[in-house]
Amino acid sequence: MWAAALRRLPLFSTLSEERLRLITRAASMKTFDSQAVVVTQGTQTGLLYVLLSGRAVVYRTNEQGREVILRYLPQGAHFGEMSLVDGLPHSASVRASQRCEVLMLREADFARCLSTEPMFCTEVMKALSAQLHRAFGNVGVLALMDTRGRVAQALVELSEEVAGQRCIRHRDCRSEMGKRVGASRE
């Protein structure tokens, strides 16, 4: 049922038909309403999550409840693989920014894919490497740019190319932009 949707995603595109069928039978689906928390920082769920529809936001909070947005997840994104690989609790929370359908794959099924599908391992490593590159880039932006520069960088990241021009389709409110760039709303 979800095999066609998964086949289009880079992480699952290299799996054998048999492995993909096993995954789709073993996986479960859950719908999250807008603003519902999918994963909570500091917990261990033992699941890989795949965003089949909707959008979500990855964020961290401190003891005082202050929040910083790390990343926006579009449809087709996956998360939770870091905790499955290293066995540590989730390093961030994930919240639906609009109604989402999320496919969830148990740790044992993820581990079977890693051990039997070499190209799946490669795709997981690529995804983890991309996260690390993004984190290094974010550290550089936060450390080396003033607030104005961080806002400008965030606007560029939110934009996409449409008919030769940069366009922002999903606008953040000021408080969300502040959380994204590590500054107050003002």
Image (cartoon, rainbow, N blue to C red):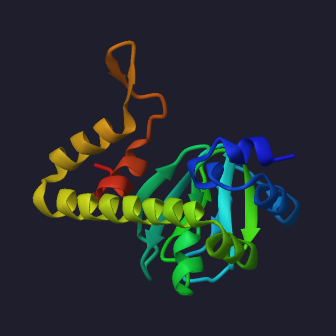
Q: Is residue 83 left or right of residue 140?
A: right
Residue 7: x and y in percent read 69, 45
Q: Is residue 41 left or right of residue 46?
A: left
Tell me: residue 27, above or below residue 170: below
Q: Does residue 53 show up?
A: no
Residue at the image position 68 percent from the left and 56 percent from the top:
15
Q: Does residue 136 show up?
A: yes
- Name the one closer to the observer, 10 or 102: 10
Tell me: residue 51, above or below residue 105: above
Q: Quadrant of residue 18?
A: bottom right
Instruction: Report the number of discs.
Output: 0
Q: Is residue 171 left or right of residue 19?
A: left
- Outermost residue toward the top? 163
Tell me: residue 100, above or below residue 39: above
- Outermost residue toward the bottom? 87
Q: Quadrant of residue 139?
A: bottom left
Residue 133: x and y in percent read 31, 60
Tell me: residue 152, above or below residue 103: above
- Name the one closer to the observer, 90 or 95: 90
Q: Quadrant of residue 180?
A: bottom left
Q: Is residue 158 left or right of residue 120?
A: left
Residue 76: x and y in percent read 61, 46
Residue at the image position 60 percent from the left and 45 percent from the top:
55
